[in-house]
Amino acid sequence: MTTTVEILNKFGRSDLMDLCEAAEAAILDGGGFGWVSPPDRAVMERYWRGVLLVPERVLFVARLDGTICGSVQLVRPSRNNEALAFSCQLVSQFLAPWARGHGLARQLAETLERRALEEGFHMIHLDVRETQTAAIQLYESLGYNRWGVNPNYARIDGKMVAGCYYSKALRTAAG
Ligand SMILES: CC(C)(COP(=O)(O)OP(=O)(O)OC[C@H]1O[C@@H](n2cnc3c(N)ncnc32)[C@H](O)[C@@H]1OP(=O)(O)O)[C@@H](O)C(=O)NCCC(=O)NCCS
């Protein structure tokens, strides 16, 4: 079984379909990916095509034996925001349930961190529902520090769910 992680700039043969299927499976499993239930396939396809077009976003995909099974995105601050230019965000990380436990989420996050460093960022921010215990375990093991909790972060099936805010310093403000 081979596991790989890469930046995706262009969809190869079955990449878009595989990415949609992996995202749908993760959403049905309880997500953490914004969607509470999977949207129509056409909407999902437009979403991923859009991600590749947004200049502030970098899409990283994980593959198991060549098939895309998960992803994460680096989001740069908008170019007019000089005050936030030192930091970027890690968003929308997921692995399809069938691809979990192979270290791919860790590899995705570490690859994103390396890219953030290369781009000169000093800090990565992320937020996650407090119910996503595997993700919280992963980020804390990678050295992300929890600095806040929003009790009204998400609404899932009519109930409010808290969200945890994390940051990781990649280097000191002085570089
Ligand atoms: C979080 C998630 C991406 C982990 O994917 P994964 O491929 O299984 O993770 P890995 O195999 O790379 O494991 C990395 C670490 O995650 C943590 N982890 C993974 N599964 C876990 C579980 N079931 N319980 C507790 N911690 C877990 C561990 O710290 C693990 O490190 P270890 O193997 O050294 O113990 C996956 O569970 C997922 O997609 N969850 C739903 C979406 C989500 O919560 N996204 C985050 C919101 S942005």
Image (cartoon, rainbow, N blue to C red):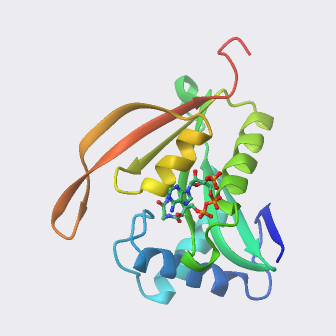
Q: Is residue 162 above or below residue 97?
A: above
Q: Residue 9 vs residue 53: left or right?
A: right
In the figure, residue 30 lies in which quadrant?
bottom left
Residue occupying image coordinates x 72% and y 67%? 62
User: In x, y percent, where is residue 109?
Assistant: 66, 50
Point out the residue furthest to the right here.
Answer: 2
Q: Can residue 131 be seen?
A: yes
Q: Is residue 165 above or below residue 68?
A: above
User: In x, y percent, where is residue 160?
Assistant: 19, 56
Residue occupying image coordinates x 82% and y 77%? 1
Point out the residue furthest to the top here.
Answer: 174
Residue occupying image coordinates x 84% and y 73%? 2
User: In x, y percent, where is residue 10?
Assistant: 77, 72
Q: Is residue 141 above or below residue 173?
A: below
**Which quadrant does ligand 1 occupy?**
bottom right
Quadrant containing the C terminus in the rendered view = top right
Residue occupying image coordinates x 79% and y 87%? 13
Point out the residue furthest to the left here.
Answer: 158
134, 37: nearer the viewer: 134
User: In x, y percent, where is residue 134?
Assistant: 49, 56
Q: Residue 26 vs residue 7: left or right?
A: left
Point out the residue furthest to the front here.
Answer: 101
| Image mark count | 0
Q: Can residue 77 be seen?
A: no
In the figure, residue 116 lies in which quadrant?
top right
Q: Is residue 106 above or below residue 49?
A: above
